[in-house]
Image: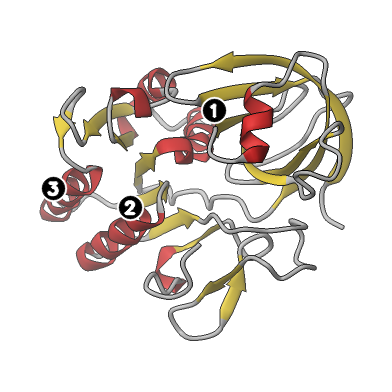
Amino acid sequence: MPGTMITMPLARREELEAGYHVLWFDAPEPIEAQAGQFAMVRAADWGSTPLLPRPMSLLTAGREPSVLIKVVGEGTRLMGGAAVGNPYTFLAPLGTPWRVPEPNEETLLVAGGVGVAPLIYLARELRGAGLARERIHVLYGGRTVRDLPLSEQLDELGRLRVTTEDGSRGTEGRVTLVVAEELERRRADGIATRVYTCGPHGMMAAVAKLAADHGFPCEASLEAPMGCGYGVCLGCAVSKSEGGYLYCCVDGPCVDAATIDWTGRVF
C-alpha cells in the first residue's frame, strides 16, 4: 500500500464563504508530499455512514496537513461541522504529482472552485524552487465572488486574474474565455508555457482543448469516485483518448490532459 495511514486530530477549521472550509490537522510526524498528491480522509467517529473515506487534494503537507472542502454531501457536511480535536485517519501521500515545468517555460494555472487547492500547492512549490512570481500566471474562475476561496493566496504567489459568471469580481464570464485570449497572446508572442488545470470537468475539458489547439502542453488534476486510493477497488477508471482506461488514484490525479477522452466517462 502506498502512503502511510496516520491518525491525527483536527487542529483548526476555518469557515469561508459559500460552504467552503479549510481544515488543518496535527500530524504526529511530517507528511512528505508533492504538489498534486492527495489523501484519503475519514473521521474516526463516522461509524458506517459514510462508509468510505473521501479523496482530498492536499493544500499543505508537513506537520500541519490541510485540505480545502466544499460542503456538497454527507462526508463534507460532517467535515464542515467538525470540532477541534476530532480524530481523523489520513492515508497519504497518494497519487502522481504535477510534473515540473521545463526551465524555459512559464506556467499558466487555471483553477475553478476547490480545484484551487493543488494549484496553490504547486505555485508554492514553484516559488520555493526559485521561479519568479512574474512567471506564474493564474486564471481563477467562479460563479460569483463567493466562489473564489483562497484567492488571496494565489495573488501572493503569482499574477492573478479572476473571472466570475455574474461579474461580481474581475472579468464577467467563464474563465475559459480568458484562457483562450491568454493562450492566443502567448502563441503570438512565442512564450513557452505549460498549462496546469484543476476544477469542474467541463472547465478542464475546455482548457485541455484550448491548450492542444494552441500547441501548449497541459496537465489536469482529475477527480473521480474512489474507495481505496491505491488501485485495488478500480472504481476511479477514466476513459483515455487512445482507448481503454487509466485509474485516477495511481495513474493520476495529475495527468497529461491530451491522454484523456474528455467526452468519455464523466467523473
User: How many C-alpha atoms fall within 10 Å of the one at disc 1: few (<14), some, or many (≥20)?
Assistant: few
Vertical placement of 2 versus 153: above or below? below
Question: Circle 3 sits on which residue?
Answer: 181
Q: Amino acid at mark 1?
A: Gly
Q: State the residue position of label 1.
A: 128
Q: Position of residue 41 (x, y in %)?
A: 74, 40
Which callout, 2 or 1, points at the residue further toward the start of the chain?
Answer: 1
Q: Secondary structure at mark 1?
A: helix
Mark nearest the camera among 2 and 1 is 2
Marks counted in the figure total 3
**Residue under the point 22% across and 47% down:** 179
Percent of width and height locating residue 148: 36, 27
What is the three-letter code of the residue carrying label 2?
Answer: Met
Q: Position of residue 27 (x, y in %)?
A: 83, 24
Inter-mark Cα distance, 3 to 1: 29 Å
63, 263: nearer the viewer: 263
Asked whether, in this view, residue 29 is left or right of residue 175, the answer is right
| Residue for point 44% across, 57% down | 219
Which residue: 34% across, 61% down? 205
Q: In the picture shown, does residue 39 fall above or below 79?
A: below
Q: Is residue 60 at all visible to an observer of this figure?
A: no
Q: Which residue is mark 2?
A: 203
Spot occupied by residue 14 in the image (x, y as percentages of width and height): 58, 14
The figure's colour scheme reads secondary structure
Q: Quadrant of residue 9?
A: top right
**Label 3: which secondary element:** helix
Q: Badge 3: few (under 14), some or many (20 or more) residues near its Cα, within 10 Å? A: few
Q: Is residue 80 above or below residue 197?
A: above
Q: Residues within 10 Å of mark 2 (few under 14, many from 20)?
A: some
